[in-house]
Image (cartoon, rainbow, N blue to C red):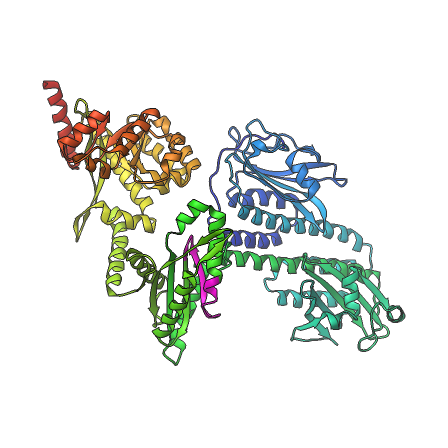
Amino acid sequence: MSNRVLPMLSEKKLESKTEQLSIINQFSLSLLQITHLEELFEYVTSQVVKRLGFVDCVIYLADQDNTYLEAVASMGVAQHSERYEVAQKTMPIEAGITGHVARTKKPFISGDLSIEPLYIADSRPALSELCVPLVYKEHLIGVIDCEHPEQDYFTSSHLQILSTVAHLLSAKIHQVRTVDHLTATVSQLNEAQLIEKCILNIANITYHSQELDTFYDELYKIINTVLPASNCFIGIYDTKQDMLEIEYLIEDDNKCLAQQKVSKSQLKHTASYYVIRTQSALLCDRQQFQEHVRQGHFEMIGRSPEAWLGVPFVVNDQYQGVIVLQSYKQLETFNRQHYTILTYISRQISMAIDRRLAKQALEHRALHDDLTGLANRYLLIERMKHAILSLGRQSQSNIHCLIYLDLDRFKSINDSLGHDVGDRFLIAIVNALQKCIRKTDTFARLGGDEFAIFMENIQDEEQVTKALQRLTLAIANPFVIDTHVLQASSSIGVAFTENDSDSAITLLQQADAAMYEAKSAGRSQIRYFNNAMRSKLKHQADIENDLQHGISNQEFELFFQPIFTLNQPRVVSFESLVRWHHPKNGLVAPDKFIPIAESTGQIIELDRHILTLAAKQLSLWREQGMPEVKVTVNVSSRHFASLEFITLIEQLYAQYDLRKGSLCLEITESGLIENLTLATKIINGITPLGVQLYLDDFGTGYSALGYLHQLPIHVLKIDKSFVEQLCTRDSPLIDAILSLAKSLKLQVVAEGIETPKQWARLKRKGCQFGQGYLVSKPMPSNKAMAFLQAQQQSTIDS
């Protein structure tokens, strides 16, 4: 790959497959407005690829002899200039990964370029590369090459959508080049102006028409102005099913509306099949047509035409096509000019049909689960909405039911046997469950090991009871995956709706709530949504609504709990703990609203507010001449999924002129390891500010020990559940944590110290810091500072 001015990282990624479909649709529509290749290439790099979340993209075109590649457009974020440049404009086609893709005409994806022998490193090498060819009808046009400095950045979804972009781009490049070539050719003909106009119109409707029927109608109008087309048909041949479908048919200037399917036994004796089979166009007058019949190429079916013109085209590996014009008038014939025009038209038809199939494939992927092929959450909700609305139009009293299934302990299978076995186990369960439901039921995968079955138009709950019996029996049967005999069970929640004013989202929430009640009751349980669950959901919804008002109305206050040394007792920092002054419920503890904020996504805004409160308090204490002190804030792991968090912390330090290292962060161990690479970048990004990271509740997870040495953290906080054990006995786990921390040169804070015995044992074990009610409960800001001043004065006096 060529040397480039190095880009800055851009971490924006695709949010959903629906977004992918939106990108492709917008790209397809935008092609209508773009007629120049330079503008087209600039649009692809600056708009389409950038929307995919890539930070580096170059488009290369091959020369006529396929000896070198030339860069025609590029995108990136340069360090020292506003415009991204490609240092090397041309390269031999034998060079590097781009040359390999160009020569093989096959895409390339790598998550670790350091082990790729073909990779030619830049001055600042990348770690991931995605390169797809630009190919039309097996003819090499060029390549689209994308790099990223993050390892394993590009996914199969990136490959799919970039390949689709490349396919459309190749067709557009070919179209523009073809139009240019045909424009030069038809200018020499007597009807040059009319033909040129028709060709441009065909190119326009190819991308303008959303529906294929509309495309065919508009196409026929254009064909009929330049060709004798009183008898015309377009057929698509399915090679897998040996079936020809007549997609469009005109007989004696009249459109036949009914589509016809012709089997191979009926088709194989026709001139149309001869054209498809030989993949050669056929131009015949009456005598030539009859000569083909005499030679046995095809049979005379129906009346003999005076002239016949057929042109084949290929859509993809499965579908081939043919467009045929027939004349039954003696003075109406076809010539080479007609042949040239129809050949061009056949290519436009091929692109239009291929575009429709690609769109259908993208729509299917956007609405279905990749692994199981089941409907996804979006499609389930849409079908639920439609079915609920239909309740108001029905004369009989039907109801709908949603069954929510969660497989018990499925994660242990993934962890112990691997995701490959886990995936095949899921597929086996899905296949078993599909045999237990009606064809009209919607079976959806909601994510991980959670599924839903939406049963429409049931007469009574007995139908659901019988369905649940079938489902539980099917799951209970052992599944053999490779040599492993696996046993499944599920927690099931059930909810009903019978009113057209009900909400699909609410029905899903109700079934989900019932499922969690079933899971809490043990394995293989079924629970129906009831009024008690409804009250609980209402309470959660009220909290969710009140949270937003609470932030706007400044209803949140920080309390501060000291963190102190165990050797020579003195306060070294405060942990800030949020309290909510609810206008109706009074002072609300965080465990009553933080989980709800996490589940609704409001935790991001709430954390920003809490961080701002902490920064303001530090600034106020400093203005008042109070002693310098460090404050830690608990934050959600969601912040460690975006580099924007670095900017937020930098802004707080700058806006409130905070002393270096005065505002620090606490996060749970499971939150960090969800995205280890990105979390590490974020922690390293805020380290220059002196921000220390405290790993909260350490020891309660099961994965952090394997990743701990990779995390740039500073302090471990031993969970209070382990400290409590010190009242009656020693804790080997605390000994292990202290030993691990010492080897990794980490500080340790023991949480929940409530007795002198706990203090003494922790001190004897070498724990450096502590926190707990023995010294102080969380206090408002004024009392916290008074406590700190009194403690410091006591130290001076002693």
Task: Left or right? Give the position of 336 relative to 505.
Answer: right
Q: Quadrant of the C terminus?
A: top left
What's the residue at 59%, 38% (across, down)? 74
At a point 66% along the width and 44% down the height, the residue shown is: 106
Residue pushed farthest left?
797
Q: Is residue 152 above or below residue 364?
A: above
Residue 501, visible in the rendered structure: yes
Q: Nearer the viewer, residue 651 or 400?
A: 400
The picture places residue 308, in percent across and down from the top left corner, at 82, 69
Looking at the picture, how far across and down is residue 201, in whole percent?
68, 60
The answer to whether residue 191 shows anywhere in this view is no
When asked about the image quadrant of residue 133, the answer is top right
Identify which residue is drawn at 23% across, 39% down.
721
Task: Determine whether 396 is above or below 403 in the image.
Answer: below
As displayed, is residue 100 above or below residue 497?
above
**Quadrant showing the N terminus:** top right
Towards the viewer: 129 or 29: 129
Residue at 26%, 32% (x, y): give it. Answer: 732
Q: The magenta stretch spans which residues?
A: 432-450
In this picture, residue 458 sits left or right of residue 102: left
Residue 470's quadrant in the figure?
A: bottom left
Residue farthest along the bottom direction in this orientation: 395
The verdict on residue 686 being magenta is no
Q: Nearer the viewer, residue 108 or 553?
A: 108
Asked if the magenta segment contains residue 442, the reply would be yes
Tell me residue 203's x, y (percent): 68, 57
The image position of residue 584, as x and y in percent, is: 17, 53
- Number of numbered tags placed on the structure image: 0
